[in-house]
Image (cartoon, grey):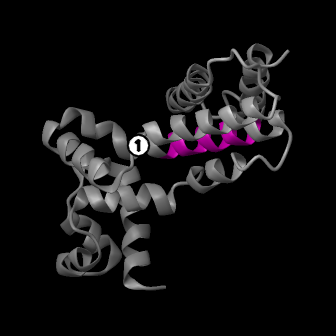
Amino acid sequence: MGTRDVILDAAAEVMAERGLANVTTRQIAGAAGFTEAALYKHFTNKADLLVAVIRERSPGFTQLAQALKGDNSLLDDLTAAARAAIDFYRTGFPMLASIFADPGTLAAHKEELRRQGAGPHMANQAVAAYLRAQQKAGRVRRDADVTAAAGLLLGACFQHAFLSHMSAPGHDDDGEAAASFARTLLESLTD
């Protein structure tokens, strides 16, 4: 495993434990067993490191893209997308929640997302694009608002993940929640 991967693994662990705003690049480098200079050879700043952690170490990120390829039934694809979104949001909360309490960290993160052409809106756009393709194929009603549908699906997943952090373990089955969200959404999208 290379230096970059070791740093990413350490960053994912430390950020999940302490939150992005409560950790320094020095602490992340130390947890990885490297100097801060080694960290900066691979990442321009802490915000860049966070984006890499989200893209490369967060469960659900890759699975969401896979689910939206359209290889299965509409219900199966949306259920898989919802399950991936729940996993992604659940993992992200501990890392990201603290940035809202630190305006400087939030501004740096938003700027890094803008610089990289990334951000949370991309998930909504991906689900809406998937639904738009299904609409063109005749599997989703022509008059359905696919942008709103994407927001409803991902919003439900976001809330489910949030509630899992606020409830006792095992409060809900993620797979059943994902399937329920997909089924309920499909009732409004199909004839």
Q: Is residue 157 above or below residue 22?
A: above
Quadrant (top left/top right/bottom left/bottom right) for the C terminus: top right
For image coordinates 26% across by 72% down, the residue present is 29
Q: Position of residue 84 (x, y in %)?
A: 64, 44
> Horizontal placement of 99 versus 130: left or right?
left
Which residue is at the far bottom?
Answer: 2
- Please provide percent x and percent y for residue 85: 59, 40
Q: Amino acid at mark 1?
A: Pro
* 161 with respect to 183 (left or right): left
User: Measured from the top left, where is residue 91 in percent x and y?
Assistant: 50, 46
Q: Which residues are magenta?
A: 79-91
> Which residue is at 56% across, 25% downward?
147
User: In this figure, which residue is indicated by the disc labeled 1?
Assistant: 94
Callout count: 1
Which one is nearer the viewer's eye here, 163 or 41?
41
- Element under label 1? helix
Q: Nearer the viewer, residue 119 or 84?
A: 119
Indicate the position of residue 22 as horizontal and vertical percent values.
Answer: 23, 48
Is residue 90 rendered magenta in the image? yes
